Image (cartoon, helix red, strand yellow):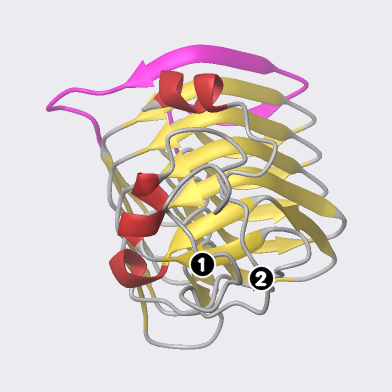
Amino acid sequence: KFVGLFSYIDGAEIRNLRLTGSLMFVSADGYTGGLIGYATNSQISNIINTGSIQGTNDFIGGLVGYSTSSEISNSLNTGSVQGNSNIGGLVGYLSDSRINNALNTGPVQGTGSLGGVVGRSLASSQISNSLSTGRVQGSSLYVGGLGGLIYDVISSNNYWATDASNQSSGGQESEARSYIGLTLATLQCAIQANTTSDNSDCVSNDGSTEGLTAAATLFNDWDLATADGQA
């Protein structure tokens, strides 16, 4: 029922793994991830996946298909992720869980409830300091550059590339929480945390060039040394 390097974990800690190479490919039905099919009460950190993850049903993620009461941090997906619904570049379905310092550059494809980092996120989850630049393609509702169906979630300091993802929405984005979509060139321009118009030419001094209501701060309060280590 659950498919991944680890099909099901409960109360586990998994860290410092690279899922790479020409044979890194996962194909299954649902509840499928490159690393874990179903994770509960677990800690997952410092993971890189470059392989293609394909499912014919729901809950498909580059790293984790379904996560509940778990934390995923300092992790990267560059592989393609494909399925039906609840499809995410890192996690397909996130419940009462946390994602921090996550990056997705791989394409994500499905019908609905799909996003560059998370397909669906509910029940008091948190997503912070995360970025997606991969293309996101869906044919139904709740398709976003970073998150698909996002509800009852604290999302802050997150970014997605609007042009590269082909998505103008990120899933409950908020300027106040520094959860915004910008062009890939603008995101790539920033080479330090807390990039503003005062210390760079990357963004305008009033947000007008970026289509925002106020000046933006790029990678607000990020630890870019950690992010660079995952790239």
Q: Is residue 7 magenta?
A: yes
**29 drawn magenta:** no
Query: Circle 2 — which element?
Result: loop
72, above or below 177, in the image: above
Q: Please tell me which residue is depicted at 23% across the width and 30% down the height of the picture.
A: 24
Label 1, label 2: how many angstroms apart (C-alpha)? 8 Å
Name the side, left or right, on which 110 lies relative to 15. left
- How many numbered circles does the render carry? 2
Q: Residue at x 71, y 23 (%)?
A: 43
Q: Nearer the viewer, residue 146 or 56?
A: 146
- Give the residue type at disc 2: Glu
Secondary structure of residue under mark 1: strand
Question: Looking at the picture, which amino acid does disc 1 mark?
Answer: Gly
Query: Which residue lies under the disc numbered 1?
Result: 181
> Can residue 125 be seen by looking at this rendering?
yes
Q: Tell me which corner region of the image, top left, top right, bottom left or bottom right, holds residue 177.
A: bottom right
> Which residue lies under the disc numbered 2?
173
Whole-percent x, y for residue 158 in the image? 61, 53
Asked whether disc 1 touches disc 2, contact meaning CB atoms under 8 Å apart, the reply is yes
Question: What residue is shown at x 61% (from left), y 71% (from top)?
Answer: 206
Answer with left or right where residue 155 lies relative to residue 165.
right
| For residue 143, above or below residue 96 | below
